[in-house]
Structure formats: structure tokens, C-alpha cells
Image (cartoon, rainbow, N blue to C red):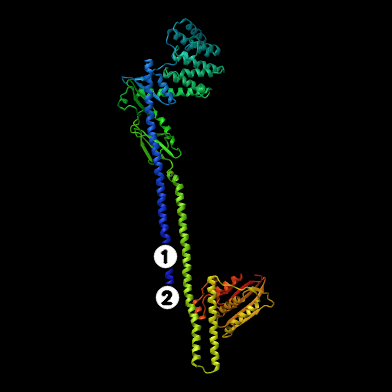
Amino acid sequence: MNKISSKDQLRWVILLLTIAVILPTICLLWFMTQAVKNERLAVRQKLIDTYKQQLEQISQGCDSSYKSLAERFIRDIEQSEKKTGKPPIRLITNLVSIFSGRHSLIVYDANGQVEFPKFEKADIESEVDSEELSEVWNVEFVTKDYETAAKLYGEVAESTQDNIVKCKAIVSKARCLAKKEQYSEAIETCKYLFNAFSTTSIERNVFVLPPAIVINNNIRLIELYIKTSQDYDDLTDGLLTAIGNSHWPLSIREFGLEKLKTFTENGKTIKNESRQAQYHHVHGEIKAERQSISVAEKHPNTSLFGRWKANTIQRIKMPETTYVLFFEDEVRKYVLVNPPDILFGYTNVFKEDSFICKFKDNAGDYFGRHDKQMPAAKPILSAPMGDTFPEWSVELYMKDANIFDDTASKQVAIYTWTGVLVVLLILSSGAIAAQVIGRQIKLNRLKNDFIATVTHELKTPLSSMRVLVDTLLDGNYESEQTTSEYLHLIAKENERLSRLVDNFLTFSRMERNRQAFDIVKTDPAQIAKAAAEAVQTKFNRGNCRFDINIEQSLPDIPADKDAMVTVLVNLLDNAYKYSYDDKKVELKVYAEDSSVCFSVSDNGIGIFRRAMKKIFSRFYQVDRSLTRRAEGTGLGLSIVKFIVDAHKGTIDVVSKPDKGSTFTVKLSKTN
């Protein structure tokens, strides 16, 4: 009944302990999961708040930039008109230069008609606009008599009073000399043209000579220098300066720039850095002006822009994507073409490897620094643009969907590892507690069994002695021999009781670690003989063969004689109790290396391998049913182990089931 109750008790304790461990672990895991989730949400919200502020700054910055641009432009125009009284066309060039030539401008007058750019077309190659030149032109191009044509062009240049005809005749003469491969004369003729109409430089020629003549004469002079392998860098610089004159017709400037591009490999051979910058600037101006002409041709009046609110940027329908900024003053209306490029400068606050910043225009189309990178996902943030950008918005997309997790990963890792360590600590503590409680419960069960065994073991000799004493006191005996037998029985039970009490006292001292041993040099043979004498009477009864083998001349060993006798008596007593009816017990004492060995062998029931490690535990009994029949408390071998360990010796067991056991105690000679 006690055994079943002990198991039930252990089961309930384990159940409660499991609940005490698992419940906090589950709660901790739940809290940890929530903490990780909240941390991710907190990081996400923090980043979104930060990026939202940056998007708002982009919107405000773009709005204020374009408003100030329009205000500054109008202010400069008003100041210039007050000084000159004329439309400040030169301001167009200044405005374009602010944006590195990437923008173009259209100016409408008070009537809503295009004032700038001018739709002028110039004929670059036509030179036959007088009777004098037409006759010579036939000689050059029809009869191809270049030498005669050169002479005739020279005569026309000397005889005519018209400067335009004179210039064209000189240019044509140089052309004919070049065709005759008279390069030196041709070069001198080209130089003569510039020297005849200017005493300074080409820059002055633009006020005297027609632009087409200046451009053609410069180009021909450069070609002649190339054929004669002369350095023409100064000439390309002069040509670049001439092309940069914004008052010339666009077609002439484009023609000159295209020629210059072939001479300088897109400006790379221009040695002067300032000239390189000027080249790119002029190229941008011409491109912007061409674009402004395209828009002006499409919108020759303000019928479209008149419906717009001033100082706004919108997209207009053109073959290419085109945006315009519309603003006005009291007299004119202005359209700045393709101004949104400046918006990209505000998106640099975002890391390009993590985000894509896109602008959504009034037509619902997207554009940005990387137009091809358009994520399919929705934007994480979107902010409306300012008043300058009606129906516009700026949107932020993530390249990496895990950016929030990556940002929160460090704190999440701290939470995770902390939670894992706490869970492991709880589980470890629970396992240790379960182990300790399990051992304690098992020990309590063994102690309960021990108490029951002790009660039985003490009660048996006491009951026997009481019956024998009562019999003697009542005089119920037949002879003195019977009296002697009863007294021997009483002595036997008393001896048995004494051994039990000695074991209990030894166990008690073991429990309190207060067992003291009187270790002195002792003869091993005396220990063995004393133990044999103590069990001789018991072994002589019944069918038991007891052999004692003690080597001669054994060395003395440091030992407590009485304690070692107790060791051997317990081993011999177990050998007797756990042997079959035909008992064979042997006690051997012999020297081995530097030790003296005490060996007790029997032919008893033996010990199973799995029980070998437990037999020296307190209260442990291999077979309790057998213990009841053979008498025992489960303390004998634990006392043996305790005493042997106190002597710094060892005890070995060799056993096979149903073939007996051999216990060997080794004590060092020098211990």
C-alpha cells in the first residue's frame, strides 16, 4: 500500500513541477514573441515617422525652390527693363546657366503671343543673292574652273561697295583656292576677311558680319589648318565663342556646334578647362532653345497656360515627356520647360541601396532618378507636394522588404537570446528540482521500507528471546540440556540483535559524518580470523561449507580492526543469506602488488549487471521478497562501502546470476 502511495505521490509531484516549469515558459515565450513583434512595429513606426518628415521636407523644399526661382526671374526682368527699357532677352541665357543648360524658357507678351524664342531660319550655304556673284558661281560650280572663279571672286570683292557681297566674295574665293589645293593662299584669304572687318577678334565680327559668314569662314579656316597640319586650338575656341552668342539664329548655332563637334571630338580636345565648361554650357543652351521652340510651335499662344494657376508645374502633351513651370508678371507670361530635374537633388537624403523615391505628376505618371526601378509593391509612404505642384505627390518605396526587420534585428536578437537563456534556466532549474525531488521521494520510500524492515528485524529476535525467557521462567523444560539449548538460542538472538544495533549505530554516524576510526598498523590475518570467528557458529549450522585461506607472512596494514571486521562480517553474512541450501562460502586474504586483498566468494543467487551500481546505495535491496526470507535491512553493503572509503581502499564485485558473487576489498600497505 505504501509503495502505491509513494508512486502516486511522485506522480503528483512531477505533474505539479511540470506545470510550474511549462506554464512560466509558455508565458515567457508569449511575452517574448509580443516584445519582438512590438519592437519591429516600433522600429517600423520610428523609421516611417523619420522618412515622413523627410518627404515633407522634400515637398516643402521643392515648392519653395521653384517659387523663389520664379520670383527671382521676374525681379531680374523688372530691374533690367527699368535700366534698359528693352525686353531682357539676355536674362534667358543667365537663367539657363543656373541649371547647367538643362532647361528652356518661353516668353509670351501681353497679347499672349510668343516673344521668345524667335522663329528665325537662316540659310547657311546660300551665297547667290546678287548678279555679280551668280555669274562667278556658274564658273565655279558649272564649268568647275576654280582658278578663274577665284580671280573673278577677288575682282568682285574689290569692286563692290556692298559689304555683304564683299564678304561672300572673299569666302567664295577661299573656297575655290582650297579646291585648287592652294591652301596657303586660301588661309590668307580667310584671315583677310576677319582683318578687313575687325581690328580685334572674332567676337567683334558678330556685330559687323552676318552670322552665317562668320561661321562658314571659321569652319573653312579650321579645315585648312587641319589639311596643313597646323594647330587649330585657338580657332576652335573662337568658333565656340561665336556659337555662344545667343542673338544668332538657332539653325546657325546648331550648324556651327555640329561642325565643332567633329573638330574637337565632342569637346574633349579643348585644352582649356574653362573652354570645356563653356562648350557644355553652349551645347545645353542650344538644346534648351530647340526644345523651347518645339513647345512654342506647339503652343504659340497662352490658350493652354491661361487656365493654369500661376507658379505651378504640370505635364503637357508632347512627343517626349515634358513638364513646364508657368509663372507671370504684370506684362508677360513665362514657361520654364522641364524644370522637375531639380527635384532629384532633394531625394539624396534616402539611401539609394534601400529606397526608391518617385514623383507622381498631375497625369498620374511616375518619374524619378531611376525610372526603370519601379517596385510592384505599394509605397510605404506618400506625401502631397506643395502649391507649386498641384495633384502631385512624392512616394517612397523599399528596394529591400526586410529593411525594417534588419533595423530591428539587433534589439530582437537581444530579446530572443535573453528569452532563450531564461527558458533554458527555467528548464534546467525544473530538471534539477525534479531530479532532487525524485531522489528525495525515492529516499523517503527506501527509508519507509527500511523502517518496516528494521521493525521486523528487531521484533523477530526480541519475540524469540521473550518466548524462550518465558518458557524458562515458567519452568516448562524437561532437563538441564533443554535449559542450555534455550540459553544458547537466547545468546544467538542477542548476538543477532547486537549486530543489528551496531549497523544502525554505524549508519547513524554515517548520516551525521561522525564516524571516527582508530587506524593503526594491524595484522590482516587477525582481521580475517576475528570475522570468521564471529560467523563461525552461524555457518556451522545447516548445510554450509566455509573455507578460509590466509597467505603466510602478510604485511601489516593501517586499519581500524573492529571496522574492518564489520566489513568482512557483513560480506560473509550476505554470502550466507543469499546462497542456496548447499552453501559454499570462501574467505581469502592475500597480498597483491602494494595492497592486501580480502575476498569473499559464494555460490549464491548472484547479481544482475544493472543492479551492480546500486548495491552500495543506502537501503537498496536487489530482491525484497528474498530479503524478507533471508533477513536484512539494506544497510550492510552501504556500511561496507563507507568503511572501505574511509580507509582509502577499494571494493570490487564480480558476479553472475545463479553462479555466485565475489567481493574483493583492497587496502594499501602504506595508507
Quick check: can you spot residue 608?
no
User: In the figure, residue 310 lies in which quadrant?
Assistant: top left
Residue depicted at x 41% and y 50%: 35
Quadrant of the rendering where the N terminus is positioned: bottom left
Residue 180 horizontal/vertical position (percent): 53, 13
In the drawing, does residue 99 fall left or right of residue 330? Answer: right
Residue 237 vs residue 31, the one in the foreground? 31
Residues at marks 2 and 1 touching, judged by CB atoms closer than 8 Å: no
Residue 227 in sight from this viewpoint: yes
Name the mark on residue 235.
Answer: none
The amino acid at mark 1 is: Leu
Q: Amino acid at mark 2?
A: Met
Is 561 located above or below residue 468 in the figure? Answer: above
The tally of labels here is 2
- Front position in the image: 351 or 616: 616
The x and y percentages for residue 603 are 58, 79
Secondary structure of the residue carrying tag 2 is loop
Foreground pick, 446 / 494: 494
Mark found first going from the N terminus, 2 or 1: 2
- Dividing the image into 4 quarters, which one contains the C terminus? bottom right
In this view, the residue farthest toward the top is: 159
Give me the residue at 47% from left, 10% from top: 167
Vertical arrangement, residue 638 with respect to residue 35, above or below: below
Q: Residue at x 43, y 66 (%)?
A: 13
Label 1: element kind: helix
Front position in the image: 574 or 602: 574
Q: Which mark is residue 15?
A: 1
Which percent across, then down, holds residue 660?
57, 77
Residue 246, above or below 472: above
Disc 1 packing (10 Å; few <14; some 14–19; many ≥20): few
Q: CA distance from mark 2 to mark 1?
A: 21 Å
Mark carried by residue 1? 2
